[in-house]
Image (cartoon, grey):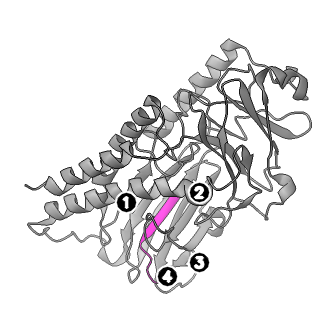
Amino acid sequence: MLTQSFADAVVEAEKIVADAPHVRSEQDLREGYDYLAGSIQAALRLAWAYERDFPYFVQSTGPYNKMGLDNPDALYFHAYLRDDAEYVVTGTRGSTTDLSFQVLDGDYSPVDVPDSLTAFDDRALRIDDDGTFELRFGPKAAGPNYFPLGKGAAMLVVREVYSDWANERRGVIRIRRADLAGAAPPVPPADQAATRYRVAGKILLSRLRTFLKFPEWFYLRLPVNTMTEPRRTPGGLSTQFSSAGHYDLDDDQVMVVTVPALPASDAPYQGIQLGSMWYLSLDYINHQTSLSADQARVDPDGKFRFVISERDPGLVNWLERTGHRRGYVQIRWQRLARDLTADEGPQVDVLHIDDLPRLLPFHEQSRVSGQEWAARIAARQDAVAARMLG
C-alpha cells in the first residue's frame, strides 16, 4: 500500500502526543491533537517540496501548522540547497521591520540544532531604489550580494518580521538554481511517491520529537517564573538576542515583565510572546498573547510593563494566558546594531492580581476599556488575514 509508511508514522505520532510528559489536562491533549494535525499537513508539504535543483520557497510555519515557538510577528520561508551549486534569489523588499537570511547545514533533530553557516539581514545587501534585489549563494563568493554556501549547506531560511502589523507589508522573494534557468526537472522515478510518503513520515516524527526536546534544552532547566539575561539565540540569527523563561501561575497570580523600550536605532525590532507547553505560540490572532514594540504601550519612564495573567487586569499590555497555567515566555530583539547588556533585559515580578494598582507605577495611565480591547483584537484579526494573503 503506497501510503502505509506514512499511516504507520501517524499512529506513532499520535502516541508521542498522548504520552507527552507535560500533558495534564484535556486542554493539553486537545491542543496536542491540533498540533498533530498541523504537523501532518506540514510533513506532507515539506516532503513534496524537497527539491534542491528546482527549489522554491515554502512557508515553514504559520497560524495553522506551528512549530518551534514560532514568532507571531514573523513569516518564515525556506528552500532546500546543494552545497556545490549556485542559487539566485530575487525579490522586492517589503516594508517589514526586518528581512533576514540564514543558511543551515541541516534540519533540526531531537539531538541537535543545525549550525548556522551564514546569517545576515538586508543591511548586507545592495537594494535598488525600487526595492528590488538579487543575491547569489554559491560555493565561491565573488562580489557584492554574493554569499558563500559552506560545506554541508542544506537549507536557506528567510524571515520577514513585522512590528507594526497594520501598516507593514510583505515583500516578494523567489529562488532558482543559476545553471538551470529555463530547464525542467526530469520525469520522476516510478517509486518517487512511495519515497516521499516515507520521508513525510520521518519528517512528522522528527518534528514532534525535536520540539518536545527543545524546552528541556533552553527553558525548563531555568528556575520557574524567571527570565534570562539577553543572550544570542542558540542556532539563531547573528543580529538577534533573546530572553527566555517559563511560568507556572495560579489564576489569581500575575507575572509582570518590565523591560526597557530600546530606541529603534539600537533594536528596530523588539517583541514578547507566550507559548504553550507544546512549544508553540498561543493563539495570537484572536487573543493578545504577543506584543511588538509598535503594539505595546511604553510607560513614561521608558519601560514596557507586560502583565501575564489569566484574569483580565484591564491593562493595555495584558498578555492573555488563555487557560494555560504553565507556558513559555520569550523576548526577542532583532536587527541589533550592538550587543545587549544585562541591564537591558527583563525584570520579573510575581504578585496577586489585586496588588497591581498598588505596585505598578503607571497603572491608571495603562488602563483600557472593554471597547478599546475589542478594537485591539479586531485589528490583530484584520492584520493577520492581510498578512496571510499578502
Q: Residues within 10 Å of mark 3 (few under 14, many from 20)?
A: few
Q: Residues within 10 Å of mark 2 (few under 14, many from 20)?
A: many
For the residues labelled 1 and 3, the Cα–Cα distance comes to 37 Å
Question: Which residue does the image show at 41% across and 80% down from the upper left?
Answer: 83
Write down the region rendered in magenta: 151-159
The residue under label 2 is 99
For the residues labelled 4 and 3, the Cα–Cα distance comes to 17 Å
Relative to 284, residue 77 above or below: below
For the residues labelled 2 and 1, the Cα–Cα distance comes to 28 Å
Mark nearer the viewer, 2 or 1? 1
- The numbered mark, 2 or 3, whose residue comes first in the sequence reads 2
Contact check, label 2 and label 1, Cβ < 8 Å: no
- The numbered mark, 4 or 3, whose residue comes first in the sequence reads 3
Contact check, label 1 and label 3, Cβ < 8 Å: no
Mark nearer the viewer, 4 or 3? 4
**Which of these two is toward me, 126 or 337?**
337
**Which of these two is toward me, 132 or 347?**
347
- The numbered mark, 1 or 4, whose residue comes first in the sequence reads 4
Mark nearer the viewer, 1 or 3? 1
Amino acid type, mark 4: Gly
Q: Quadrant of residue 319?
A: top right
Q: Residues within 10 Å of mark 1 (few under 14, many from 20)?
A: some
The residue under label 4 is 150
Amino acid type, mark 3: Pro
